[in-house]
Amino acid sequence: MTGIERLHEIMTRLRDPQTGCPWDREQTLESLKPCVLEETYELLSAMDKPEDKANHIEELGDVLLQVMFQSVMAEEEGRFTFDDVANGVSDKLVHRHPHVFGNVDAKDSASVLRNWERIKQLEHKKESRHSALDGVPAALPALLKAQRTQEKASRVGFDWKDAAGPMEKISEELDELKAEISARASKKPADSDKVKEELGDLLFAVCNLARHLGVDAESALELSSAKFSRRFRCVEAGAKEAGRDLKEMSLEEMDELWERAKKGEA
């Protein structure tokens, strides 16, 4: 028995109406959504520490469990099976890699991506998609959705030729945001929705710059968040060593501890 066969057998038994697990039997597609999201993020964390092989294996298994869970539920309803899922993605991979499984020439990754997008568009002509952006999932986190949207537009030629374009756009959007903030500061009527819009445009432009620089915006922001957390913990530790409470310290005093934390990383 293969690992997949064993997992399928276990999941089927857990879902058995008479002898299965009460919790597993009660689950629905809706109730599993938080589980899918949580397991995905736990896998992302494991991917940051590949040296922890056991944890990486465990988190991959948890994501696989979610795929099997939904497949068994669908099998119960006569909709599809796990084999349908596996065969479906296998067929898609073969079809979208004609440079490997066919006679199409693709010398580099850029050529592969162009072919991939062209094949997807041909596939989606059979569906109700009318835009190159229709394939961007609505439920994606905002930062990832921005990058995927920009990538889709770029693949049909709607893009700057280099990073200079988004750099100029960042300056433009920053000026527009400053104008809205100034209106608020000068007690002139300021549209809070407009401030939000301009801030969003700035973030979108920064995301575009990251894409042009070959940087994953989500990973870059995660690194900065981790760096801030690390340094702030040092500030907390410094305050504790001095017998002080952060809430009672001035910003200047906390800045001094912050600079000390930065120098400690150098």
Image: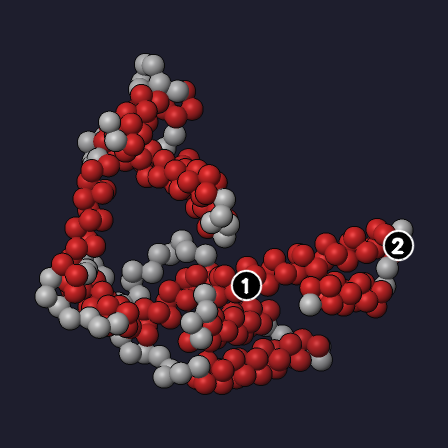
Judge whether 20 appears above or below 142 on screen.
above
Q: Percent position (x, y) of residue 15? A: 33, 23
Query: Of circles 1 and 2, which is in front?
Result: 2
- Which residue sits at x=66%, y=56%? 229
Q: Is residue 123 above or below residue 184?
A: above
Q: Which quarter of the figure has residue 252?
A: bottom right
Residue placed most toward the observer, 123 or 261: 261
Q: Is residue 186 above or below residue 64?
A: below
Residue drawn at (78%, 65%) of the image: 260
Report whether 182 appears left or right of 118.
right
Disc 2 marks which residue?
A: 242
Q: Residue at x 37, y 65 (%)?
A: 148
Label 2: how many residues lie within 10 Å, few (<14), some (14-19) or many (20+)? few
Rendered-image quadrant of the N terminus = top left
Q: Secondary structure at mark 2?
A: loop
The reply to whether residue 234 is in sight is yes
What amino acid type is highlighted by mark number 1?
Leu
Furthest-right residue in view?
243
Name which quarter of the figure residue 61 lies in: top left
Nearer the observer, 22 or 112? 112
| 199 horizontally vs 129: left or right | right
- The spot of residue 86 in percent (x, y) is 22, 43
The residue to which callout 1 is attached is 221
What amino acid type should be assigned to the residue bearing mark 2? Ala
Whether residues under marks 1 and 2 lie with C-beta atoms below 8 angstroms apart, the answer is no
In whole angstroms, how far apart are the C-alphas of marks 1 and 2? 32 Å
Tell me what residue is drawn at x 40 percent, y 53 percent. Answer: 139
